[in-house]
Image: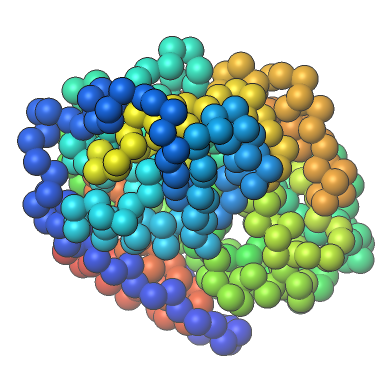
Amino acid sequence: MLSSTRPRRTRRVAAATAGIASLALLLGACSGDAENPGTTEGGDEEMTDEEITLTVATFNDFGYTDELLAQYSEENPNVTIEHVKAAESGDARTNLTTKLAAGGEGLADIEAIEVDWLPELMQYPTLFSDLPPVDGRWVDWKVQQATTPEGQLIGYGTDIGPEAICYRSDLLEAAGLPSEREDVAEWIGGEGATWDSYFEAGKEYTEATGDAWFDSAGATFQGMVNQLDAAYEDPESGEATDLATNTQVKDLYDQVLSAAVEDDLSAGLEQWGDDWRAGFQNDAFATMLCPSWMTGPIEENAGNVEGWDIADVFPGGGGNWGGSFLTVPASGANTEAAAELADWLTSPEIQTQAFENSGTFPSQIEVQQSDEVLAYVNDFMSGAPAGEIFATRAQSIDGAPFKGANYFAIHAEVQNAINRVDLNNDDPEKSWETAVTDAQNVIQ
């Protein structure tokens, strides 16, 4: 039984995810005939030299700099590109689903979708263009994630999120603990690292300093639950499992909150919140789970803070967190041109540049072991050989876990439960019971 009696820092609880229960109803009302999905063929008049503007909507940092996008306009002088970037994926999801429910008015020509909320949108294939296949470009499981049972390709893959551990070498050194990246990897457990060994290392740090080991229980749980083959749904039927009897998820819930609350390893910060962003500046935590794309937000939020590094290790073996897709809404005026741009943006050459710009590790087979990727060094992360590290981490990923139409909604309720405990010191068991009830209410 977890205890929440120990005094904790004052924290702000995450707002409950809004609108999930009504998403199926809203999108279903405008999805049309699912047997005739949207297609890029015939959506436009035959391609001409007419001047057009294509909008690209992303979130966080996809590595699509102004200079990179300008390359496309140089090669296609009739195309102007406008890039709209949301602060984080939740904002992008809300914008996308709201506008899809309204018939698509106001959507970008290309909309980025994060893998965790892709499955619920794939129920409505008529809302998206059927993209021409590009054989051999991506790892197979990446393509499968964006392909409907009827064979419609709803999105082109951008990145995947092989995970390592990012850490503050200066804070570990000051605590008299291992701080060189190879030593940190071994200290956490090396190739045999487990969540227990990661938390045990954290206890050493916290006992030596009185400071937090990781940023957020919710963020740490994300890495843990991503290692389950099927967290919330039956892969064969697609139906949601009963959270009340889901021992796999409950065990992880108990484990992460025991480390966060009882051992006081968590900084208790809501990931992507203002306090979390400020935490990079005030030494609020020493380590965090680090999918390759996270190196961009770390640099953005840490600013001039030195000491960040990457350890080539991850508890529980391989892990993939995130990874996105570029989709072309069927309601767009220039779907064929948008599909061509999406094709270009997800090409091996451009995804290599994106990786160098922001750490978004390519899902393209051709470049994962390329000289350009393997030689990439992240100067901000203490000169870490990021390309080599994340390529190694990517080799540890064994396919993708099953995430069905109910994944996002149920997972949000579990994360809300974790945040109530980690941020507001709620009772863990009561918070779990609330998640069980709330999950039942949002299942489609």
Q: Please say if 160 is above or below 58.
A: above
- Left or right: 365 with respect to 237? right
On screen, residue 48 above or below 104:
above
For this orientation, the residue located farthest to the top is 135
Q: Measured along the vertical axis of the image, is residue 8 above or below residue 28?
A: below
Asked whether residue 433 appears in the rendered view, the answer is no
Q: Is residue 73 left or right of residue 198?
A: left
Q: Position of residue 66 (x, y in %)?
A: 64, 47
Give left or right: position of 195 versus 282: left
Q: Measuring from the top left, give residue 258's x and y in whole percent.
A: 53, 65
Front-most of 216 and 330? 330
| Residue sitting nearer the eye, 421 or 288 | 288
Give the residue at x 18% y 53%: 103
Q: Residue at x 63, y 65 (%)?
A: 215
Question: Depth check: 331 or 91 in front?
Answer: 331
Residue at point 24% right, 66% down? 19
| Residue 269 position within the rendered picture, expressed as x and y whole percent measured from the top left | 58, 72
> Which quadrant would residue 50 be assigned to in this image?
top left
Is residue 369 at least partly visible in the picture?
Answer: yes
- Image-based side of 160 in relation to 281, left or right: left
Q: On the image, which quarter does residue 326 sit in?
A: top left
For the point 68% across and 43% down, the residue is: 67
Residue 423 % position (x, y): 51, 77
Up-down: is 424 above or below 161?
Answer: below
Query: Which colouring convention does the figure follow?
Result: rainbow
Q: Quadrant of the N terminus?
A: bottom left
